[in-house]
């Protein structure tokens, strides 16, 4: 019954997503799951299935609205620290290479680990190394075709910590050292994507997911608090709240087991420890992701456009139009025009949220990225906007 209700909610969220995309001229939605074992949809004691494929109704719902769903998975359940993720991006690793790594993880080789429920059919569908369009990670997430919504679902910042704990890392590296290392590489990846949005007119959004909330005790908050702060530093990034996970789960019993054996195994089946989600929790987590996209997609797109225009305008004033520096009326009119242009399709509440988010973002970055706009000019225009919204 719980799963039925979760799936019903998922259908509503997917339908809402289709409506938003269709209304805004999107004909193709690309979702790239990027990162660690959660991004790969892994479970140690339950069944494996790539994260986005766990949303069973999304493709059909989008298709009814004339939208093509384009799914990609650049994720592993091991050797997945954020420095490696950045390397994948920088080297433009092919998707087939990631699939080969997954096959080593699940099917053959000395590094093979638990792969519950993984059939030959699944392997052929999810981890094919003979792809028709074998594109690299950069090619995919920095693509900006007309009608494309390009979204990255990022799960990370656990790899180095777990490596140090489970692979005989130095004692001094077993607490926060790994997390700090992962956060550095995470920001390198986010900077890379934002710079592409600014300089090459891409429009990639990143949905940065928190680590599972084990037993609802907020044990992972020491990671997630940092992820929230980092998300606020970028125009194109939104934090996704994790869900509560049980940690202890009933171990998977193979479908090939006969009924008598299943009955016996279920009676003696002790709970297994797992830091990943189970099937139901993954469904709920997917719902969180889709809900966050629905609430933030249009605001993020406005943020990307405004950030790009302000960044290039400030740079142009600095290098090419210094005679206009200090022309406050001209600069204020430019700021006002840009804010109007990229917020005119938003609802009143979305405009309020955009202005609040934009104000903090611009002022935090103004000394380095937007200096020649002038702090007083920006504050005056934003103050006037806020007065209009609250009339």
Image: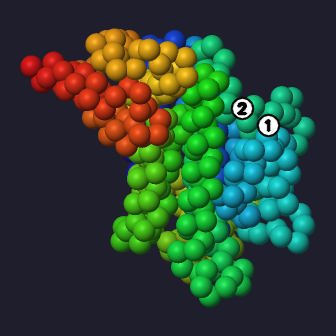
**Where does residue 302 sit, x and y in percent of width and height?**
42, 24
Q: What is the spatial separation of the Cα atoms under label 1 and label 2, in whole angstroms?
A: 6 Å
Left or right of residue 299, residue 72 in this image: right
Quarter occupied by the C terminus: top left
Q: Is residue 235 above or below residue 314?
A: below
The residue furthest bottom is 171
Residue at coordinates 47% horizontally, 35% vertically from top-left? 369
- Looking at the rendered structure, the secondary structure element under dot 1 is loop
**Where does residue 132 sit, x and y in percent of width and height?**
86, 29
Evaluate if marks 1 and 2 touch, with contact meaning CB atoms under 8 Å apart: yes
Crowd class of label 1 (few under 14; some 14 to 19; many from 20; radius 10 Å): some
Q: Who is closer to the viewer here, 99 or 59?
A: 99
Q: Who is closer to the viewer here, 3 or 335?
A: 335
Left or right of residue 172, residue 280 in this image: left
**Where does residue 56 sit, x and y in percent of width and height?**
58, 38
Residue under label 1 = 136
Q: How is the image coloured?
A: rainbow
Q: Is residue 244 above or below residue 292?
A: below
State whether residue 137 appears in this view. Answer: yes
- Looking at the rendered structure, the secondary structure element under dot 2 is helix
The residue furthest front is 323
Labels in figure, total: 2
**Where does residue 165 sit, x and y in percent of width and height?**
63, 80
Residue at coordinates 60% horizontally, 34% vertically from top-left? 195
Q: Which mark is residue 261?
A: none
Q: Who is closer to the viewer here, 309 or 177?
A: 309
Residue 77, quarter of picture: bottom right
Crowd class of label 2 (few under 14; some 14 to 19; many from 20; radius 10 Å): many
Residue at coordinates 30% horizontally, 27% vertically from top-left? 378
Residue under label 2 = 140
Left or right of residue 112, residue 325 in this image: left
State whether residue 122 appears in this view. Answer: no
């Amino acid at each position: 019954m719980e799963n039925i209700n979760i799936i019903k909610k998922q259908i509503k969220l997917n339908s809402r997503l289709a409506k938003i995309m269709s209304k805004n001229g999107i004909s193709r939605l690309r979702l790239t799951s990027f990162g660690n074992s959660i991004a790969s949809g892994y479970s140690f004691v339950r069944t494996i299935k790539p994260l986005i494929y766990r949303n069973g109704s999304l493709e059909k719902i989008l298709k009814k609205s004339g939208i093509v769903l384009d799914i990609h998975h650049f994720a592993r359940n091991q050797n997945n620290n954020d420095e490696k993720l950045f390397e994948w991006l920088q080297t433009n690793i092919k998707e087939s290479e990631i699939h080969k790594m997954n096959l080593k993880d699940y099917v053959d080789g000395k590094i093979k680990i638990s792969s519950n429920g993984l059939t030959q059919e699944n392997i052929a569908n999810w981890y094919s190394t003979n792809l028709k369009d074998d594109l690299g990670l950069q090619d995919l997430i920095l693509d900006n075709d007309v009608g494309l919504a390009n979204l990255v679902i990022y799960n990370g910042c656990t790899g180095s910590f777990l490596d140090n704990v489970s692979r005989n890392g130095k004692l001094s590296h077993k607490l926060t050292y790994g997390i700090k290392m992962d956060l550095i590489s995470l920001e390198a990846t986010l900077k890379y994507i934002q710079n592409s949005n600014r300089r090459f007119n891409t429009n990639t959004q990143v949905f940065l997911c928190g680590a599972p909330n084990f037993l609802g005790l907020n044990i992972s908050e020491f990671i997630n608090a940092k992820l929230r702060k980092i998300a606020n530093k970028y125009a194109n990034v939104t934090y996704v709240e994790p869900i509560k996970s049980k940690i202890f789960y009933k171990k998977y019993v193979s479908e090939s087991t006969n009924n008598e054996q299943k009955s016996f195994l279920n009676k003696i089946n002790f709970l297994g420890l797992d830091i990943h989600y189970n099937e139901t929790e993954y469904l709920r987590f997917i719902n969180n992701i889709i809900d966050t996209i629905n609430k933030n997609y249009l605001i993020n797109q406005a943020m990307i456009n405004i950030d790009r225009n302000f960044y290039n305008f400030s740079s142009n004033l600095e290098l090419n139009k210094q005679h206009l520096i200090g022309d406050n009326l001209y600069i204020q009119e430019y700021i006002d025009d840009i804010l109007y242009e990229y917020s005119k399709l938003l609802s009143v509440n979305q405009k309020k949220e955009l202005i609040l988010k934009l104000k903090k973002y611009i002022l935090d970055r103004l000394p380095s990225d937007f200096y020649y706009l002038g702090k007083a000019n920006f504050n005056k225009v934003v103050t006037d906007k806020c007065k209009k919204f609250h009339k």
